[in-house]
Image (tube, grey):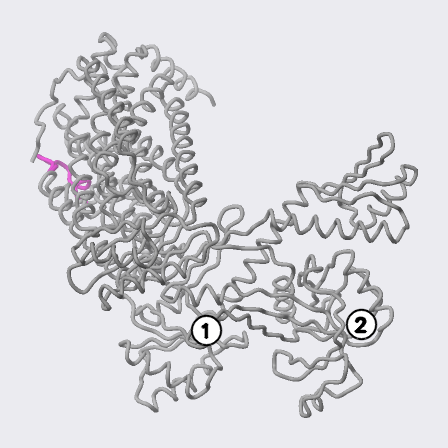
Amino acid sequence: MEFFKSVPHIRFMAQRQLCYIISAVLIVGSVVALAVHGLNLAVDFTGGVVIEAAYPGSADLDLTRAALRSAGYPDVAVQNFGTSKDILVRLPPLADKEPATAVTQKIETALRTVDPGVQIRRTEVVGPQVGKELVVKGFTAMAVTVLLILIYVAFRFRWKFGVGAVLATLHDPFVVVGVFAVSGMTFDLSVLAAVLAVLGYSINETVVVFDRVRELFPVMRKSSALEVFDRAINETLSRTVITKVATLIVVIGLYAFGGEALRGFGLALIVGILAVTYSSMYIASGVALDLGSSHRDLMIQEERKAAADELP
Amino acid sequence: MNRYPLWKSLLFAVVMLLSLVLALPNLFGEAPALQLSRKDGGLFVGAEAVQPFKDLLEAQQVIPDAAFIQEGRLLFRFVDVPSQLKARDLIESASPGAYAMATTFASRAPDWLRRVGLKPMSLGLDLRGGIYLVYQVDTDGAVKQTLQRLERDYRTALREKRIQYDAVEGTTSGVTVTLKDAARLDDAKAALANVDSNVTLTTSVDPGNAYIRASLSEVQVRQRADFAIQQNITALSNRVNALGVSEASVQRQGANRIAVQLPGVQDASEVIRLLGKTATLEFRLVDQGTSAVEVQQTGHAPLGTKLYKDRSGRPVLLKRDVIVTGEQLTDASSSFQQGEPAVSVRLDARGGDEMLRTTRENLGKPMAVVFIERERQLRDQDGQKVAVDVTHEDVISVATINGVFSNQFQITGLLAREGQELAKLLRAGALAAPVYIVEQRLIGPSLGQDNIDRGVRALIIGSAALFVFMALYYSAFGLVANLILICNVVLLTACLSLFGAALTLPGIAGIMLTVGMAVDANILIYERIREELRNGNTPHAAIRAGFEKAFSAIADANVTTLIAGIVLFLFGTGPIKGFAVVLSLGIMTTLFTALMGSRAVIGLIWGGRASIQRLPV
């Protein structure tokens, strides 16, 4: 089987200005969605109490809320979790050094008044300072990753490629986070891990295109840089599409069959992979091109490399 | 001809064979088991230790599936949960209170695998169920305690030298002494330096007043904070061990946190109560005037004495006057003195003075250390739960005073293991830095099982769909890619088992992502081969060029993903770290299998043929 019998001749780079606008809209949209809806941050980040419980039959959310209210928790959030029998109870962070077990036991007792057969599947109590640190750590991790990747790509290619790669890479988590803001799905630790994995994946994709550009520049001496970029994208297009299909098959499996705990992780990766495909083709190459990447940039490196090879 | 170098093919074959063996224990799954540990801290040694228990169980028709010793603990594996529970009751009723017993799971892997030291990946808390606690150690509080101690010692030192002062005040990072008489500044400085020579002292004089500022160096602050954390880790480890939970762990997390994992445990409040005990120490003289056994029989302790028991239950009669308490202990460590195990103890200045006075007057007499543990228990009182503080007091050491000493001394005459144990207890009993729980997670066993089922189901469905796709799209080469993917997962499993990593749900997701991304390396190579074929190259040249030209893209692409994985590992905790480990290891196994393995397999199948008309790619 073969989808691409011959190398296509799509003029990707001609559309790059349009794609800059699309990306700008996507990023602004994400920021607006973040500002308006905010992220539905999990207890990992906000601190607080989460209890997952399973009723033997269908859960009565109103009754549950009433029982918890009369137990002294008026600002409790109760929702279904996965199935109609499972519920998730969320409470804001406890006062400093308040004993967590007392609270979880009270909630358990309250749930039992609704249905004595209720089964507690999970309780999590996270102090507010833990969550704050996680947010700081998450951002630091992202900044460090981007910086290291910039250095690596600049070292292996040229700084113009590095900037293109980093802009494309930064673009992708914005899209993922934007989708989570709009959909209101819970953003938890595993989603954060997925976003960071998308960072790595995005750069992976960009590098494959750049690698082909690096290879084509010496061969296509008479062509313009734009033509070289276009040809590189076209020549790698088959691989790009097949790889995306292969990875998406697996990730959709995670999303559909991994249960509630992996759903957010799966969604972040699905959105991330789609964003990555687009950004590695248009944004990374476009920026590298518009920064004035030319034969000279890579030829110098080739010569240097050749000179280095000749050293004893 | 297009053969891959033989040694490279062989290397790949050997690595894969080895990985198969390493990954093998994971195939057998787990069965309910019972774990026994001795409550006196002793270890089970030798196969004969197993026999009496086996006889006891078999006499009641409870036949263990396997029985062996693991890290000094006995493990019995059973076919089902009822026999596991029955065995627990039988052993408890045969020797009540002698053993800490924990119901757990043991691998069903055959004996020979275990004997050569091969173990399956353990399951993380999210898959097995259990309790996860994170304690925050108040290191600032610990430093403050040190400053308060310094303040007190300075007052005493100045009084002893009859140097008058206006004030001795603690600040956030040191102590300021204000003297009445500037002329005695040097005397005062000498006196303070005598208390603790490591503290930096600076003097300043303004009209009418003279000041001495004492400040702790950064090193001292860090040492104090470290001691506080080590002390709490020791205390928590001791109590966790006493719970007898298998695969429990107590680990330092970041600068000032301690993470405790208790797989399989479900009663959070009980565990937190047991872990939240506070301990202290008292050094007292032994009363030699009356026989302790006599006092125990009559129940009348003479005036000024109190009856205690040591850890094996023998009575010891001690004087009521306390020489030194745990609050004055600053360090304790086990060491060797002239080839003999010993415990070195350090006290603060005040404790040193007391010890000097006592040892001078009581040379040759025995001195005892009492370990006091307080825990808060909930008791029923008129139908109401009331918190009661319960105190346990044990004599942990009785030693003869062989010389006059003050704030540094050794306790000798111990076995090596006793020395370590005593040092641990002494540290645990030193003034404790306050701790509190900042994170607490409890995962029920049913959720754990669900997570396993769903994770594995997602893995199987996703991989199967991917295999079908690859076989359809690349025909025979697709099958090679699938074989390489399987090799990749086997190698990854082997690495994780070898490193003793715990498998978590994010870990399963990491394996899936590895599979999804590893296939990319093969696709890069195959697309390259197709391109070369389209350009009119011969099949052999296409294979060679495909691998060569794809190499730089594969290497660069994977290194950048590896960067992301390593950063995740460095900044992440808990689940993120687990995911990062799998992702990073997965990238390395991908590079190995895709570059070396694919080449070897393709070389083996097509490389030997002199002429190929068409490549099935």
Give the residue number, with chain letter if any, for mark 2.
B401
Quadrant assignment, res B521: top left
Give the residue number, with chain letter if any, for mark 1.
B73
Q: Which quadrant: the N terminus of chain A?
A: top left
Question: Magenta stretch?
Answer: B605-617
Determine whether B547 is above or below A25 in the image: below
| Magenta stretch: helix, strand or loop mostly | loop
Left or right of A186, for residue B282 = right
Q: Residue B587: image x %, image y %? A: 32, 41
Q: Residue B386: image x %, image y %? A: 48, 70
Numbered disc 2: secondary structure: loop
In this rendering, the count of numbered labels is 2
Q: Residues within 10 Å of mark 2 (few under 14, many from 20)?
A: some
Residue at left 15%, top 37%?
Answer: A245
Determine whether B119 is above or below B81 in the image: above
Residue at left 87%, top 71%?
Answer: B361
